[in-house]
Amino acid sequence: KQEVTQIPAALSVPEGENLVLNCSFTDSAIYNLQWFRQDPGKGLTSLLLIQSSQREQTSGRLNASLDKSSGRSTLYIAASQPGDSATYLCAVRDDKIIFGKGTRLHILP
Amino acid sequence: EAQVTQNPRYLITVTGKKLTVTCSQNMNHEYMSWYRQDPGLGLRQIYYSMNVEVTDKGDVPEGYKVSRKEKRNFPLILESPSPNQTSLYFCASSSSGAGELFFGEGSRLTVL
């Protein structure tokens, strides 16, 4: 059974720093992996989608990588801003969609 | 505007009173799904649908029903709600089984 783990559960960094969020999964037979952002009490906003055949995707200050063989994905955020404070979730998709429990990110002004 | 719309956004009900949470998408997506989000447990898939008249159980289907009679709608039905179904519910859709997933704003349900 697929399991998705996100470490750390919470992270605080000063504004302006670059940071990396981690996502690991146990079964490499996935269709894709998607990163989301969730603000408190809100829905999920899609950040990046990486198909199983891809190694990385970029959008603005965000870069996501995927290494299927090792069961890992990273979300790199460059030049962090207070507005980046949110919970970041990764989800892997095979026949079902399994979410990690998220990393709660706090950017310190 | 492309969106997934859920209603109601907030609902307080009592044990045993049947309720339906509606979900509608305007992107002509084939795939739709429901999730519940609980503190400490994260997001868990309840049911999903690959297309009209095709539905499958997710990880936590007990106590829920769904139907997919039209492509745009995927209602979640709680026939006899219980307090352990108090949760934040999300509907999502994608163009296929491997497409980008888009979420609704969520429906907060409280069962007394």
Image: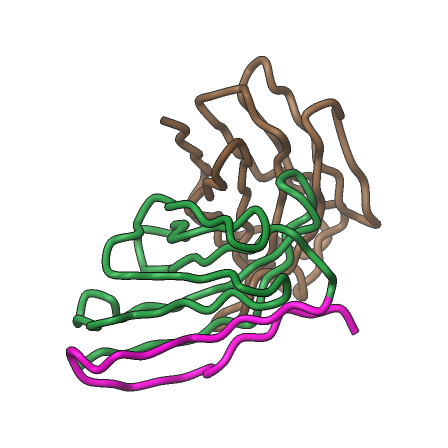
Picture mark count: 0
Residue, x 40% and y 61% (percent of image)?
A: B66
The x and y percentages for residue B104 are 57, 68
Q: Is residue B81 left or right of residue A79?
A: left
The x and y percentages for residue A93 are 55, 36
Residue A18 seen from this side: no
| Residue B55 highlighted magenta (yes or no) | no
**Placement of B73 over or under A72, stated as above or below:** below
**Placement of B43 over or under A66, stated as above or below:** below
The x and y percentages for residue B12 are 29, 86
Q: Residue furthest right?
A: A60
Please identify the quadrant where the N terminus of chain A is shown: top left
Residue, x 46% and y 40% (percent of image)?
A: A98
| Residue B6 highlighted magenta (yes or no) | yes
Of all chains in the rendering, the one displayed in brown is A
**Placement of B46 over or under B24, stated as above or below:** above
The x and y percentages for residue A33 are 61, 36
Residue, x 48% and y 64% (percent of image)?
A: B90
Query: Foreground: B20 or A86?
Result: B20
Residue, x 71% and y 69% (percent of image)?
A: B26
Query: Foreground: A44 or B15?
Result: B15
Please identify the quadrant where the C terminus of chain A is shown: bottom right
Query: Foreground: A13 or B57?
Result: B57
Of all chains in the rendering, the one displayed in green is B
Residue numbers of the magenta segment: B1-26
Q: How is the image coloured?
A: by chain
Residue A50 seen from this side: yes
Q: Is residue A33 left or right of residue B83?
A: right
